Image (cartoon, grey):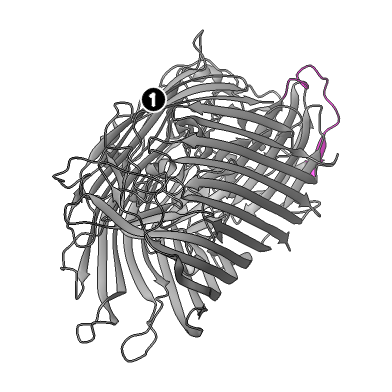
Amino acid sequence: MRIKRSLSNSWLLLVMVFLPLLMAQSVQAEVKQNQPTAFNTGESFKVTADSSTNRKIRRRGEIEHPATNASGLLSQSSTSQATPASGIVPITGVKANPTSKGVEVILETPVGTQLQVTNRSSGNNFIVDVSGGQLRLLSGDAFRFRSQKPVEGITEITAQNIDANTVRVTVVGEKTLPTVELFDDDAGLVFAVATTATAMQPPQTPQTQEKPASQTPSTQGDEPIELVVTGEQDNYRVPNSSVGTRTDTPLRDIPQSIQVIPQQVLRDQNAPSFNEALRNVPGLTANRGSTSEVPQFSIRGFRAAGGNDATFLRNGLRDAGRVDTRLAPNIERIEVLLGPASVLYGIGNPGGTINIVTKQPLRDPFYAVDTTIGNYDFYQGAIDLSGPLNDSKSLLYRFNAGYQNSNSFVDFYNQERFTIAPVISWDISQRTHITLEGEYTDRNEVFDSGLPAVGTVLPNLNGKIRRGFFAGDPNSIQYLKIYRLGYRLEHQFSNNWSLQQAFQWGLSKVNSTDRERYNFSLDADNRILSGLLFDEANDTNTYDLNVNLTGRFSTGSIGHQITLGTDLGRYERRDNLLSAPTPPLDLFNPVYGQPAAGPYTPLFVQDNSTDTLGIYVQDQVKLAENLKLLLGGRFDLFKQTTEDFITDTRTEQSGNAFSPRVGIVYQPIGPISLYANYNRSFTPVTGRNFEGDVFEPERSTQYEVGAKADLNSQLSATLSFYDLTRTGVLTNDPNNSNFSIQTGEQRSRGIELSVQGEILPGWNIIAGYAYTNAQVTEDNTIPVGNRLANVPENALNFWTSYEIQRGSMKGFGVSLGFFFTGERQGDLDNSYQLPSYLRTDAAIFYKRDRFRAGLNFRNLFDVTYLEASDYKVGNFYGEPFTVQGTIRWEF
């Protein structure tokens, strides 16, 4: 008996405010009669099998109402055999049989209905992950199946194990994404693949890797029960990530909160910068404005920056040189691991880690061009090209390039940027793969150091400083060049053991050919701004090498996925900084272009370097199907060296740190994961105390519990509670005023809730709420109980988009977003507050085939608000009402 699986989309979800209640129970769906139709394989679906056995599979005539959710479907079909005691369903044969419409791929197993199926598309690649099973083929390669050009229009079909209980099936269309339908069958799971090219072709000789014929059940004469799987190609939900474990792992199996901003969200919001993109992550707040030179954020209350730590990663490697504030055209998605991550990445910010995932080559030709025009003279263009370089498609490429030129609501501000990013991947053999990746960015912009608090959020007898005022030197142009080169090598020794090696080199060169202005103080009348003018040149080199050995094995009934790895890194920075007193700048009657108030003198000329070595082990333990344990530990050695060429001195300090991690995931029912974790991280502290002893690294310890829920096949939610304490913070030595001691302590406690994915076909959402109580708990100078700077107690992000699915208006869509940030303290002294604000965004768009046009409106009601506070004279207004139009073609 063959059953065509389905997920009807007639279920209307309740308002998201009831999410905690939904997490406490299994997701139910309403049954509605539906007519069978084929689904496009760009669409996403997920079918979960029921664990009960010996239920009768009914025929078409016995079913009046097709099931609209997984549990409803399973009440209609189940297997006649139970899952093996190991919990893993064996797939003993794979067939690729040509049919009149294309090709039929059969995963042969007598218990196919106990498998869970999810899919996604990438270019012309249709990818299906079958969870709960493992290839154990009885002929040929026991762990891999491959069929090349089985029919016209299909380039390749592969099936292989990607972990101990997941099989990945990939169907590659020659020119377009193929159409796939999924059936339950007595023989196993059946994927009916069709393309336009194969629709009218006669059947061909089957290409089969199969078990003996005596073990292959016959299915002739069975009448299919046609249930329809529907969904959307454009996904707001990413089910898997590697940032939390360094392995491709379902988010629901990771005992830590992870937020992913996928490509479709970045495109729908037309996000030009990290500030805009990361608004979608609860618990994350910008510390500088979008016109700043580098992105800086507070994550779970603790400050993060693009410096010498693992706050920013690029494809899992430290991106410690210089991170551009603007989003490069080759960014595929952004992953944020909330909480400490030293066990995986070494030196890091305790609040979280931001991983930038770049676009990778596609097996079939893909070409895209888009252009954006907006107010404030915003112009942007980008191209995205990919495809094979040889007939066998073992050599692939991708090339992204983009240009951006814009002014701003801030007077005199202008930025211009050009980026190219080539990638080449090569299948050296069936088990060995290498990717070579490069990137070059050339950017120049006027330096903006923000505005004083007095006259913006604090009263000033002289008046209020207007939103677009520029408190700097219009000639302060900063030039930045960023170079990146790297490779990733992967070799699979067997189905269960593999080796990955990755290397990245980065160089950033900063020059200010004229002057930069840093504002430091106001006069007694709060009118005249003074500070320093800088002439700056610095070069930063980073080298990072990572080697991972990953293996899967069992000890009795307990499964293990172990990762042994090492990181070797070097950070080098040379600074040549000259300074001069600024000319006076009247905030209410400015005169720009005045000469410096004194001569330029060397402020510091020095070389800094940090060498790191980390060794780590991680074990993802599967105690049972619904109980998983994550254990990890890492030992780091580091050495920091500073050479001061002005004083002709050289200082060195070294240290070590051990970072443990323990996490557990319990899944009481299929859609729900309950988790808890204990985690530690470290950050080196430069300097010595009065006794001459080197400072110990700062340590941070987190306890977190939470729940993750799949509300349906395309909509998920995460609720987390955490307690994060940072110790070893420098504070003034009460007995020696010119020195510091490490007795300071800061703590952040909070709640985070996020919802992400597809509610109904065409209706997507990404939303979150964060409550953060971050304060000083011990200090010799700052009053205990003071809140940490620029951290709102309450913050909310909400973005939803709907696209009409049928009729004459098909392809038209609208989006609406709300971003609320509560009151924040402007500094650690809590001497002033940034007021709360609510910003409203919107968009309208039209999509047809490979064409998309859209208009994005940010700050729709032109609310005046302060986006960030870096220090008392470095406050940044958010942008006023902004409109941008984008046109995109794919070929």
- Residue 825 location (% of width, % of height): 21, 54
Q: Tell me residue 469's x, y (percent).
A: 32, 40
Residue 196 within the segment the image draws in magenta: yes
The number of numbered badges drawn on the structure is 1
Reading the image, the residue beneath label 1 is 11
Left or right: residue 437 versus residue 607 is right
Please state, as top left, top right, bottom left or bottom right, where the N terminus lies in the image. top right
Quadrant hosting residue 195: top right
Residue depicted at x 69% and y 41%: 399
Q: Few, some or many C-alpha atoms within 10 Å of disc 1 (few <14, some 14-19, many ≥20)?
A: some
Residue at coordinates 81% horizontally, 52% vertically from top-left?
140
- Left or right: 138, with 354 as reference point: right
Main secondary structure of the magenta stretch: loop
Visible in this render: residue 132? no
**Helix, strand or loop status at disc 1:** loop
> In this orientation, which residue lies closer to the viewer: 756 or 178?
756
Residue 436 in view, yes or no? yes
* Viewport quadrant of the C terminus: top right
Q: Is residue 165 above or below residue 9?
A: below
Q: Is residue 229 magenta?
A: no
In the rendered image of this protein, does residue 377 appear above or below residue 323?
A: above
Q: In the image, 785: left or right of 692?
A: left
Magenta-tinted stretch: 195-213
* Above/below status of 492 relative to 641: above
Depth order, front residue of 25/645? 645
> Which residue does the image show at 82% across and 37% down from the upper left?
207
- Say which residue appears at 23% left-offset and 86% top-offset: 736
From the viewer's side, name the closer residue of 532 and 688: 532
Depicted 609 relative to depicted 435: above or below = below
Q: Amino acid at mark 1?
A: Trp
On the image, the x and y values in percent for residue 864 come to: 26, 35
Instruction: Choose between 266 and 517: the one closer to the eye.
Output: 517
